[in-house]
Image (cartoon, rainbow, N blue to C red):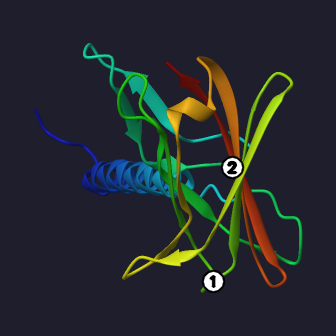
């Protein structure tokens, strides 16, 4: 078979190559921007702590970002690293990492219906990051779903994160 017009054939090949190159670039940009948006959630109102119960009746707490609300002029980004019980009838562990602080105070409000428990601690330096950590004794709570609200404040900066936790 003989090609009648070599210039037309080369031009068509060129167009096809350019088309597929552009498509690959667009797909790559889409995938990269999708992954980036998954990482930066400081203004999300969706709690991001995943707690699943395994066969041993233990809770596995997955580190994700939680919701953050601005109440003053600067946002404090709160990342929970643990929020829940390690074992049935065990204490509630509240562990966080707080960005953009070098001190300040942490308050923890646990509520279940009309029952409200309040606790507080100072922001602590953990060697390479600042955190709010508290262990709520199991004896202070009853079984059921508790809403845990964490507030962090330093000077004119504050942030809030909250999550529902099942206490067994």
Q: Position of residue 63 (x, y in %)?
A: 43, 48
Where on the picture, by quarter, is residue 147? top right
Residue 141, given in percent of the width and then of the height, sits at 62, 29
The residue where tag 1 is placed is 103
* Place of residue 104 in the rendered image (x, y in percent of width and height, measured from the top left): 69, 79
Q: Nearer the viewer, residue 16 or 64?
A: 64
Residue drawn at x 74%, y 56% is 160
SS under mark 2: loop
The image shows a total of numbered marks equal to 2
* In-front residue for pair 9/150: 150
Badge 2: few (under 14), some or many (20 or more) residues near its Cα, within 10 Å?
A: many
Q: Nearer the viewer, mark 1 or mark 2?
A: 1
Task: Residue 88 in the image: state x and y as whole percent.
Answer: 39, 22
Q: Name the residue rendered at 25%, 53% in the picture.
A: 6
Residue 67 — which label?
2
Q: What residue occupies the far top of the structure in this picture?
A: 55
| Quadrant hosting residue 73 | bottom right
Task: Report which quarter residue 120 is drawn in.
Answer: bottom right
User: From this viewpoint, is residue 81 visible?
Assistant: yes
The foreground one among 118 and 36 is: 118
């Amino acid at each position: 078979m003989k090609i009648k017009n070599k210039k037309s054939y080369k031009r068509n090949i060129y167009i096809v190559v350019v088309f597929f190159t552009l498509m690959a670039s667009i797909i790559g940009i889409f995938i990269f921007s999708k992954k980036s948006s998954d990482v930066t959630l400081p203004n999300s109102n969706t709690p991001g702590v995943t707690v699943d119960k395994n066969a041993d009746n233990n809770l596995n707490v997955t580190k994700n970002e939680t919701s953050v609300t601005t109440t003053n002029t600067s946002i404090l980004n709160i990342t929970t690293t643990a929020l829940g019980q390690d074992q049935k009838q065990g204490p509630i562990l509240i562990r966080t990492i707080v960005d953009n602080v070098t001190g300040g105070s942490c308050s923890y409000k646990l509520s279940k219906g009309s029952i409200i428990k309040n606790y507080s601690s100072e922001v602590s330096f953990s060697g390479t990051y600042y955190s709010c950590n508290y262990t709520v004794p199991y004896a202070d709570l009853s079984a059921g779903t508790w809403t845990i609200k964490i507030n962090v404040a330093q000077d004119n900066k504050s942030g809030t994160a909250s999550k529902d936790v099942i206490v067994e």
